[in-house]
Image (tube, coloured by chain):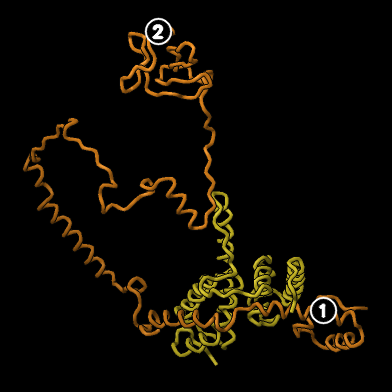
Chain colours: A yellow, B orange
Amino acid sequence: MEIRSGDELAFRQVYNEVFPVVMKVAYHVTYNQDVAEDICQDAFIRFYDKDMSFPSMDDAKFWLIRVVKNLAINHVKRKVRESASLEKVMRGPQVNPFKDGASELILKESTAAVRKAVSELPEIYKTVIVLREYAGLNYKEIAGVLKISESNVKVRVHRARKELEAMLNREEVNVP
Amino acid sequence: MCLDDQILNTYLDNELTEPWKSQVEEHLSYCPSCRARYQNLLQLSDTIKSSELTEEEIRPHQDRVLSMIEKNYLSKGKSKKSFFKRTFKVSGPQLMGVAAAFVVVFVGSWAVFGNSGSSDGQIILPDVNTTIDLNNITQTRSSDNATTSKSLENYSLDEILKNLDARGYDVDIRLKSIQPLSLDKMSSEVKVIATVSDKGITITSDGLARNADGTIVATGVLVDDKNEVVASDGTVLFTAEETQVVE
């Protein structure tokens, strides 16, 4: 089934199916719901505006995931740069990035600890683990989105889990 | 031989192909330590997944973005292209015609208005009395004007600190490199002009009266021609008998 991203009906179909996935990717890379929303909005507007043709729903989904992932990574890099230079000037109030003002949801301790650990992973491990655990992609699909080999994905997933395990053990999180 | 974490992770993600998949399953069936490690990795993966953004958290964002896109993109359709994105097709002669019209308008306007200034010869300005003396200058403060918005200067340090404190900033204020000036550290331009006997007070040319320990007891003082030390309001602080003028 061919999909034209500029066609309203096809767009709505893709939007309903893919938005939750890309929102998860954007959120688990940035850990800020408002920023994640902006990134998703940006990606879907590009998707509609470019009026591209995709051979299948999955291809459209992978295109959106790739765009969202890149926007989210860029945001994080910019944020790190800004906060590094800002910290020299002044020390602002400490805000817990895992408590979004919008949701006011008090997260369970282990959830917060996992989110914190994922946010601290190096970029190459963070992207594979987010795509594997939160976007539910298999190794082949991850390899396609990241444009790396499948065996590379295999190694990165393993190392990402190893790092997370070490970080969570340090935090002494009670694994349910 | 036991299984390493990478193979177990690949198996866990259901990415292991035959015949290795069956071999791993067989090994796990009789090796308790590998089975325990596999359970660990499975739990870790589940723990990571459990922190995922929930449906309820996603829903409001999904609705908000869709309504924004519907309003600005979908309903308008493709026909509404932005002005700047529209391509204009203009032929060569048309372009020449437009350029020629601009030249005519420009030259024409110069012919009509271009030399009007020189024919008049002189520009007459209205006569304004520009004399400024102290009587017609009054000082105004921006805070007198109710409509003026307050700038940072209108707040006292105390108000600024309170405001920052209310926003959760932890502010520490300290004066840097300011020390009370002792007599021997004074600059060369400031000279001791008089001393007051048995009180240990020195008067310097910058109009300050200091105790023996260097603290300032009065400002704006001077020594008059009768050798009296006089304060800024004219009161005599020390009489001529007490004052020794230093030449």
Residue highlighted by disc 2 = B241
Which is nearer the N-term, disc 2 or disc 1? 1
Estimate the x, y position of residue A158 in percent, counting from the top left.
Answer: 76, 74
Which residue lies at the image location 71% right of the left edge and 80% below the top edge? A139
Q: Position of residue B96 (x, y in %)?
A: 24, 65
The reply to whether residue A147 is visible in this rendering is no
Which chain does tag 1 point to? B
Query: What type is the residue that disc 2 sits on?
Result: Glu
Measured in 3D between alpha carbons, the distance from the residue under mark 2 to the one under mark 1, in whole angstroms, is 103 Å
Disc 1 marks a residue whose amino acid type is: Ile
Image position of A89 with respect to B60: above or below? above
Quickly name the residue at label 1: B7
Q: Secondary structure at mark 2?
A: loop
Q: Is residue A157 left or right of residue B122?
A: right
* Frontmost residue, A165 versus B134: B134
> Which mark identifies residue B210?
none
Q: Are marks 2 and 1 on the same chain?
A: yes
Q: How many marks?
A: 2
Rate crowding at label 2 as few (under 14), some (14 to 19) or many (20 or more) other CA atoms within 10 Å.
few
Q: Going 52% across and 37% down the picture, which residue do you hit?
A: B175
Q: Residue furthest bottom?
A: A1
Quarter residue A68 falls in: bottom right
